[in-house]
Amino acid sequence: MQMSEQREIKADPATVYGALLDPEVLKFCVPGAQEVTGNPDEGYTATVVQKVGPVKATFTGQVTMSDMVENEKLTITGEGKGGAAGFAKGGAVVTLSAIEGGTLLAYDVEAKVGGKLAQLGSRLIDGFAKKMADEFFTRLVTHLEGPQEPPEGEPEGEKKGWLGRLTGRS
């Protein structure tokens, strides 16, 4: 499974690059992360709990950073084992470009799964992988820029589901 995406972040490339190397920021950004320890030189160890379709697993794995060009580019590679659920491995090439008002972050992701997870089917896995990558980078933007304001006309704390918006009920 492969995908590419880009995000504009209202922070300079050095700040974004530093955030991508910080284990606490990584823990905040990785959905389901229970623990992330380590450093860019020796790699990181991570524990992540995820539910993919009917399969819920705790993955333990290693994350390494390579091809690092300070404030410009890095490659993130990870591999995790989820016991009977199987394994997941993949990588992302992340490039940072200075733009007016911040940084353009572009990423190319490749992911593979095996074991019970692979039996779920490629559509489910591809959708899950896209959701995970999207959530990671959304959380990174939130960490660097702060929470987004609620949309106009939707007071905080009064969020409605799609049915409530359709029927006008809460």
Image (cartoon, rainbow, N blue to C red):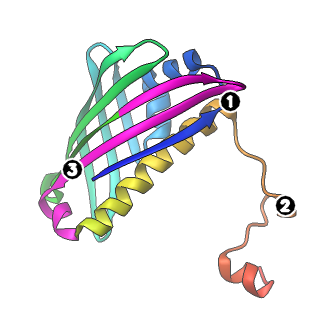
- Write down the region rendered in magenta: 93-120
Sequence-wise, which precedes: disc 3 or disc 1? 1
At label 2, the amino acid type is Pro
Residue 102 or 53: which is nearer the viewer? Answer: 102
Residue 20 percent coordinates (x, y): 46, 26
Q: How packed is label 3: few (under 14 Cα within 10 Å), some, or many (20 or more)?
A: some
Q: How packed is label 2: few (under 14 Cα within 10 Å), some, or many (20 or more)?
A: few
Occupied quadrant, residue 107? top left
Contact check, label 1 and label 2, Cβ < 8 Å: no
Sequence-wise, which precedes: disc 2 or disc 3? 3
Q: Residue at left 78%, top 54%?
A: 150
At label 3, the amino acid type is Lys
- Asked if residue 87 is positioned above or below residue 56 in the image, the reply reads above
Mark whose residue sits in front, 2 or 3: 3
Task: Say which residue label 1 marks.
Answer: 10
Inspect the magenta stretch and tell me whether residue 112 lies in it. yes
- Asked if residue 95 is positioned above or below residue 153 in the image, the reply reads above
Q: Tag 3's secondary structure? A: strand
Occupied quadrant, residue 95? top left
Sequence-wise, which precedes: disc 1 or disc 2? 1
At label 1, the amino acid type is Lys
Q: Could you tell me what secondary structure mostly forms the magenta stretch?
A: strand
Residue 41 percent coordinates (x, y): 30, 13
Task: Say which residue label 3 marks.
Answer: 112
Kindly tell me whether residue 28 is visible in this rendering: yes
Q: Which mark is residue 155?
A: 2
Q: Residue at left 49%, top 15%?
A: 71
Query: What is the C-alpha distance between the residues marked 1 and 2?
Result: 25 Å
Residue 29 percent coordinates (x, y): 48, 39
Q: Tag 1's secondary structure? A: loop
